Image: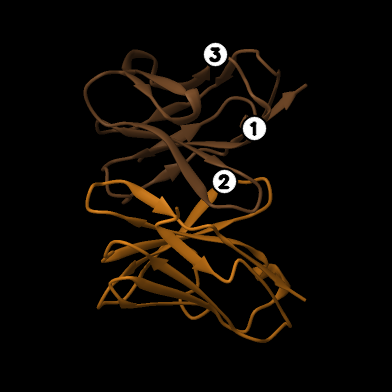
Amino acid sequence: GAVVSQHPSRVICKSGTSVKIECRSLDFQATTMFWYRQFPKQSLMLMATSNEGSKATYEQGVEKDKFLINHASLTLSTLTVTSAHPEDSSFYICSAPRNTGELFFGEGSRLTVL
Amino acid sequence: AQSVTQLGSHVSVSEGALVLLRCNYSSSVPPYLFWYVQYPNQGLQLLLKYTTGATLVKGINGFEAEFKKSETSFHLTKPSAHMSDAAEYFCAVSEDNYGQNFVFGPGTRLSVLP
């Protein structure tokens, strides 16, 4: 079964609203989680690294105020897309490394902004 | 800096035929190499990985890959394709085994024809 879970798997929202996506590690603690964005028929692009107890580290070109990341506990990281616009529509994926070294990915969350 | 190229954005094979998905990488440090599979609207699932040791790595679902340092390649193969193998496949390189500095290739979509 999944060891990293994302919720919701699909979300549709109106332009201008904010949407929160959760990423949970189910059977291990993750001090670090990663958030990716995937455009149709393209690869994953790392957006940011979420760090428990400290600020997230954003990749170049990713707007910190647009994509708010909070790593509130050792098993939960959230990505909030603020004031969403149609161009924010995408597939968002999180991942978390277990202490064995293996990286586990969530199921992904498809955001559609109308 | 690391990079990954995957020759062929789309590969079609007949059921029962050999599957060969190509991956070449560049890395300034000894690389960790991964192959992931993604089914539609789902996250990524690890097929196999190379860290150190034996250069021929066996993974799940009958897939294997061989690390060839001289060719900077990590091609993915399966002797006999099954319909259920149809998916998107991503090669990735990392400087470590913990998910930091993961770089994904553009992906190869595998179609399996009956």
Quadrant where the image shows the C terminus of chain A: bottom right
Q: Residue furthest front?
A: A1
Depth check: B92 or A65 in front? Answer: B92
In the structure shown, which secondary structural element does the residue marked by tag 1 occupy?
helix
Q: Amino acid under label 2? A: Ser
Residue B46 position within the rendered picture, expressed as x and y whole percent measured from the top left: 43, 40
Quickly name the residue at label 1.
Answer: B84
What label does residue B79 carry, if any? 3
Q: Which residue is mark 2?
A: A43
Mark 2 neighbour class, 10 Å CA radius: few under 14, some 14 to 19, many 20 or more: many
* Quadrant assignment, res A39: bottom right
The disc labelled 1 sits on which kind of residue? Ser
The colour one sees for chain A in the rendered image is orange
> Mark 1 and mark 3: span between their CA atoms?
14 Å
Lower sequence index among marks 1 and 3: 3
Q: Nearer the viewer, residue A107 or B31?
A: A107
Q: Are marks 2 and 3 in contact (CB under 8 Å)?
A: no
Q: Which marked residue is nearer to the observer: mark 2 or mark 3?
A: 3
In terms of image quadrants, where is residue B81?
Answer: top right
Question: Horizontal placement of A44 versus A48: left or right?
Answer: right
Direction from residue B65 to residue A67 in the image, left or right: right
Q: Secondary structure at mark 3?
A: loop
Tell me the SS state at disc 2: loop
Q: Quadrant of residue B70?
A: top left
Mark 2 vs mark 3, CA separation in Å:
26 Å
Residue B62, percent across and down?
A: 48, 23
Task: Residue A19 in the image: state x and y as whole percent.
Answer: 59, 80
